[in-house]
């Protein structure tokens, strides 16, 4: 698949998908064009415990999926672990360069090869406040990972996950409240509180009176409809209003 009409068609169809089956079909078609016929779009959680809240769309061999669930391999998945160290994506054969694999993780990779999953590409997908996830494409042959391949699979992963969120979490997705608007001053104060600073320390850094800092927090909590700073920090972090840069 090239960055062009085929990818544009995938993106267009993914925005209209109404079921997991449709998303699965789209990913299978994309995998065929990529020369990587096996795919997995999954959340990094205990799949048995989370049930319907987790995204798990895959065409991996049924026997391999049974093994993954029975042995709970997904809790120790080496590709999941490696994906937390990169932003764009990784080749499966490079996983050991990113994390020190345990004996169990090495065994998982070796066993996967017996099911035709020899090599592939995994893209990390993460949105604030949601389960971390990955989109993987693989096959039975070694993969030459080029910047172009990473770019294409990255775009596929982003739009496939967006479609899965919309379909699987349909009720929550449609009823999700609009993120309250925080001013730059609110963001700065909340970010500093996230690293443990109090009103006096924040005021000193921002050259504001302590009462003014307190007022900013009251306003921010009011916009969220909450009355605890700890909850405000978590909500602002999950909504993407603050990040580690703000808290530095």
Image: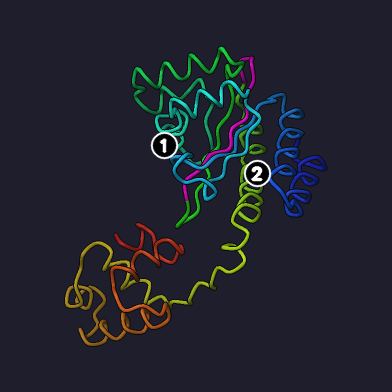
The span picked out in magenta is: 131-143
Q: Name which quarter of the figure residue 226 lies in.
A: bottom left
The type of colouring in the image is rainbow
Residue ID at (76%, 44%): 10
Q: Residue at x 36, y 79 (%)?
A: 221
Instruction: Write down the residue under mark 2.
Output: 155
Q: Position of residue 79 (x, y in %)?
A: 47, 29
Q: Position of residue 119 (x, y in %)?
A: 58, 20
Q: Which residue in the structure is indicated by mark 1?
A: 85
Give the camera-side residue of 43 and 139: 43
Q: Dot 1: what SS? A: loop
Residue at image position (58%, 37%) is 135
- Magenta run includes residue 132: yes
Q: Which mark is residue 61?
A: none
Please tell me whether residue 170 belongs to the stretch shown in magenta: no
- Residue 166 on image: x %, y %: 64, 56
In depth, the one of 172 and 85 nearer the eye is 172
């Amino acid at each position: 698949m090239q960055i062009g009409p085929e990818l544009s068609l995938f993106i267009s169809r993914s925005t209209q998908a109404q079921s997991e089956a449709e998303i699965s079909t789209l990913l299978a078609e994309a995998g065929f064009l990529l020369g990587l016929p096996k795919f997995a779009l999954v959340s990094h959680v205990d799949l048995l415990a989370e049930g319907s809240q987790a995204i798990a769309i895959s065409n991996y061999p049924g026997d391999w999926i049974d093994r993954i669930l029975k042995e709970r391999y997904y809790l120790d998945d080496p590709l999941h672990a490696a994906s937390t160290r990169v932003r764009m994506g990784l080749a499966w054969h490079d996983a050991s360069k990113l994390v020190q694999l345990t004996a169990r993780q090495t065994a998982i990779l070796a066993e996967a090869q017996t099911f035709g999953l020899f090599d592939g590409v995994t893209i990390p997908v993460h949105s604030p406040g949601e389960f971390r996830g990955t989109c993987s494409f693989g096959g039975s042959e070694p993969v030459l990972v080029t910047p172009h391949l990473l770019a294409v699979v990255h775009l596929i992963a982003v739009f496939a996950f967006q479609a899965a969120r919309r379909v699987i979490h349909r009720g929550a997705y449609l009823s999700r409240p609009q993120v309250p608007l925080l001013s730059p001053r609110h963001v700065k104060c909340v970010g500093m509180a996230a690293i443990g600073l109090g009103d006096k320390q924040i005021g000193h850094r921002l050259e504001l009176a302590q009462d003014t800092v307190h007022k900013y927090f009251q306003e921010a909590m009011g916009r969220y409809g909450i009355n605890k700073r700890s909850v405000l920090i978590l909500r602002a972090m999950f909504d993407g209003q603050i990040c580690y840069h703000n808290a530095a």
